[in-house]
Image (tube, helix red, strand yellow):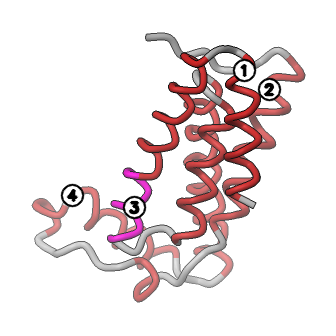
Amino acid sequence: IPAVLLAGGLVVAAFGGWSYAAVSIGLCVLVFALGTALFSLKLIGGGDVKLLAAAAAALGWPNSAAFLLYTVLAGGIIGLIIAIARGRLRPTILNLRSMIFPVLSGARPAALPSVAGSMPYGLAIFAGAASLAVGEALGLSLRFSL
């Protein structure tokens, strides 16, 4: 799926000119590199990294920025819902605090799966894409500029 999404996105971007295609490739590389860092910390799966990078390339700039923001927000909301449903809200929040403020908490960041359990991030990716699509359809999309 990511390969087809990436190829289709690059073909569409090429119709806008080579500069659009170059931006799409750059977005793919950037998101893949950041995702690989998150993967190495065991915060996200490798398939999710590939899907996010391909989607960012297919959406282009500035839609990919809005998509990633929506995806992160959806991931946080879904993560909280899953933690509450599993009765693991407190360990999840403590683990999150130790990752964000390791110096203040006096603890090393722990891997999320060992402390709070894992979550299907594909659902957050879908929610991010759906939020972008609904926002675009209603004219309520976020706009980023450089």
Give the dominant element type of the magenta stretch: helix, strand or loop: helix
**Relative height, residue 10 to residue 80 (above, below):** above
Secondary structure at badge 1 equals: loop
Report crowding for label 1: few under 14, some 14 to 19, many 20 or more residues within 10 A (C-alpha): some
| Image-quadrant location for residue 109 | bottom left
- Please state which of residues 104 and 137 is positioned toward the viewer in this rendering: 137
Q: Residue at x 66, y 66 (%)?
A: 81
Mark 4 / mark 1, whichever is N-terminal: 4
- Gap between marks 2 and 1 measured at Cα: 5 Å
Residue picked out by circle 2:
135
Asked whether 36 falls inside the magenta stretch, the response is yes
Tag 4 residue:
101
On screen, residue 86 above or below 14: below
Q: Position of residue 46 (x, y in %)?
A: 52, 70
Residue 54 falls left or right of residue 1: left
Q: CA distance from mark 1 to mark 3?
A: 28 Å
**Between 27 and 93, which is closer to the camera in this rendering?**
27
Q: Position of residue 102 (x, y in %)?
A: 17, 64
N-terminal-most mark, 3 or 2? 3
The residue under label 4 is which amino acid type? Phe
User: Which three-letter amino acid code belongs to the residue tagged 3?
Assistant: Thr
Outermost residue on the top side: it is: 146
The residue mark sitting in front, 4 or 3, is 3
Residue ID for mark 3: 36
